[in-house]
Image (cartoon, helix red, strand yellow):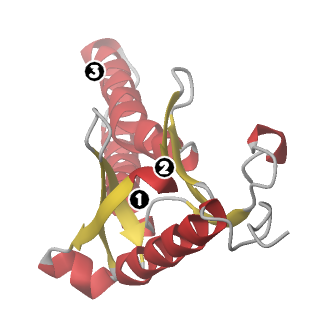
Amino acid sequence: MAYPRKLLGDGEEIAFEMRPHWRSLIVPALVLIGTVALTSYLLTILDSDGAQGSLRWVVIVAALVMLVGWSIRPFLNWLTTEYVFTNRRVIVRTGLVKRIGRDMPLARVNNVTFEKTLTERILNCGTLSIQSAAEQGSLLIASVPNVESIQREVYRLYEEDDTRRRGGGKGLPTDGA
């Protein structure tokens, strides 16, 4: 799902966009496999007659609750989360039913840091923190793939935006006219 171009400002271009790292899907996938396996096993050993027939329905309902809460919902959260970096701002959009968006202009960026746990170092992902001078402080973006290179790219985009705003880049006239 690409970010809609109609939502970009004049002269704004997408530098790169991504979803959270695939590690966000490991636990939901394991829950899916485990739930299907356990439910299948329980349904084969329980008879469909009498009290065991009612117990089969309890197993089915419990499995559906597990699948919706621990597999389907996290997958949909991953699927509907977008991290978009343009030449003017950082855009984070999340949510399927309730859509939440946060934008941070590159002009307000003060500091960009990242944090990686041991597991995240192995999987090459981490948390990106973009701090600004605005009232809301910083933008935390979790589970970012290749977080170190993304940090460098944000700094590069910031420098390009700064040059453009000062009149040395494309899109704004220079003082020498």
Residue 117 occupies which quadrant of the picture?
bottom left
Marks 2 and 1, the one that precedes in the sequence: 1
Residue at figure coordinates x 30%, y 41% from the top left = 42
Task: Tell which tag, 2 or 1, sits nearer the viewer.
Answer: 2
Give whichever of 103, 123 is nearer the camera: 103
- The label number, if any, that marks residue 175 in the structure image: none
What residue is rendered at 31% in x and 13% in y? 50
On residue 78, the disc is 2
Q: CA distance from mark 2 to mark 1?
A: 8 Å
Q: Which residue is mark 3?
A: 55
In the image, farthest residue toward the front: 176
Q: Which residue is mark 1?
A: 25
Q: Amino acid at mark 2?
A: Trp
Q: Is residue 6 left or right of residue 98?
A: right
Type of amino acid at the residue the image marks with label 3: Leu
Q: Look at the picture and state if 49 lies above or below 117.
A: above
Name the quarter where the C terminus is drawn: bottom right
Q: Is residue 170 left or right of residue 62?
A: right
Which residue corresponds to the image point at 42% horizontal and 32% vertical from the top-left? 68
Crowding at dot 3, Cα within 10 Å, few <14 / some 14-19 / many 20+, comes out as: some
Judge by depth and name the residue closer to the eye, 38 or 18.
Answer: 18
Q: Are marks 3 and 1 in contact (CB under 8 Å)?
A: no
- Looking at the rendered structure, the kind of residue marked 1 is Leu
The mark that comes first in sequence, 3 or 1, is 1
Asked if the residues shown at circle 2 and circle 1 are in contact, with their CB atoms under 8 angstroms apart, the answer is yes
**Residue 137 drawn at (x, y percent):** 25, 41
